[in-house]
Image (cartoon, rainbow, N blue to C red):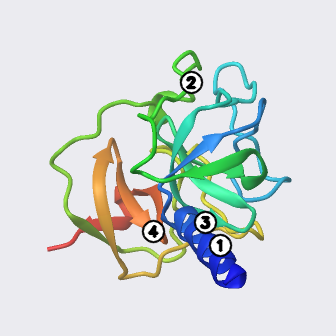
Amino acid sequence: MKKLLLFAVALVVAVSAIAADRVEVTGTNVRLRLQPSLQGEILKNEKTQKPIYPKKGAILECYGESGDFYIVNYEGTTAYITKQYTRPVGSKTAKPSKLNNTAPQIAKNTSTTAVKKAAPAAVIVTGTNVRLRSGASLKSPALQDANGNNLHPNKGQKLRCVGEQGDFYKVNFAGLTCYISKQFSVPAE
């Protein structure tokens, strides 16, 4: 009976962790990274070049996991945060999302500016080895896997589009929200 009870508790904890669409920052001065690695580039303020730290207790939207990191949204930028200093928070129990409102904007092109509503429902990739970016700019870092390799959609692949910003479509790829240049994609019919 004890084994069955322990199994049930473990299952509930595991399902809660998987179903979480938000994570809470439990540490202080936790770095956000642009790759899922402790050696990955740290997300910095574009003007001051100082690292950006979400406040302890901040609730961040979570897109998924990559190794020992959660893939999160921080003020419109996709970043990675170590699981060591966070905890999953299920959507039903989550507090309203509160990001560090006093943090300076990361960059003009990745700030919380409104995304146009007239975006297509999906786009088709027209180029080969197209880089997906964390922000709507060619200066924004390309998304990478745990080994530091750039993530590339296949030519002809259809990606769900959730908006557009300037010369970029905001799309979903492998559970990540990222940006693809309009130069290498077209609206799906």
Amino acid type indicated by mark 2: Asn
Residue at mark 4 to residue at mark 2: CA–CA distance: 26 Å
The correct choice, above or below, for 104 with respect to 187 in the image is above
Crowd rating for badge 2 (residues with CA inside 10 Å; few <14, some 14–19, many 20+)? some
Classify residue 173 by image quadrant: bottom left
The mark that comes first in sequence, 3 or 4, is: 3
Amino acid type indicated by mark 4: Phe
Q: Is residue 77 among the parts visible in the rendering?
A: yes
Q: Which residue has dot 2 on it?
A: 100
Q: Is residue 125 left or right of residue 43?
A: left
Q: Is residue 151 among the parts visible in the rendering?
A: no
Q: Which residue has dot 4 on it?
A: 173
Classify residue 32 by image quadrant: top right
Amino acid type indicated by mark 1: Ala
**Which numbered mark, 1 or 2, is in the foreground of this view?**
1
Residue at mark 1 to residue at mark 2: CA–CA distance: 33 Å
Amino acid type indicated by mark 3: Val
Residue at mark 3 to residue at mark 1: CA–CA distance: 5 Å
Residue at mark 2 to residue at mark 3: CA–CA distance: 28 Å
Q: Are marks 3 and 1 in contact (CB under 8 Å)?
A: yes
Q: Which mark is residue 91?
A: none
Residue at horizontal 70 percent and vertical 58 percent from the top: 69
User: Which element carries disc 2, helix, strand or loop?
Assistant: loop
Query: Residue 42: x, y in percent?
Result: 75, 41
Q: Residue furthest top?
A: 102
Residue at mark 1 to residue at mark 4: CA–CA distance: 30 Å
Crowd rating for badge 1 (residues with CA inside 10 Å; few <14, some 14–19, many 20+)? few
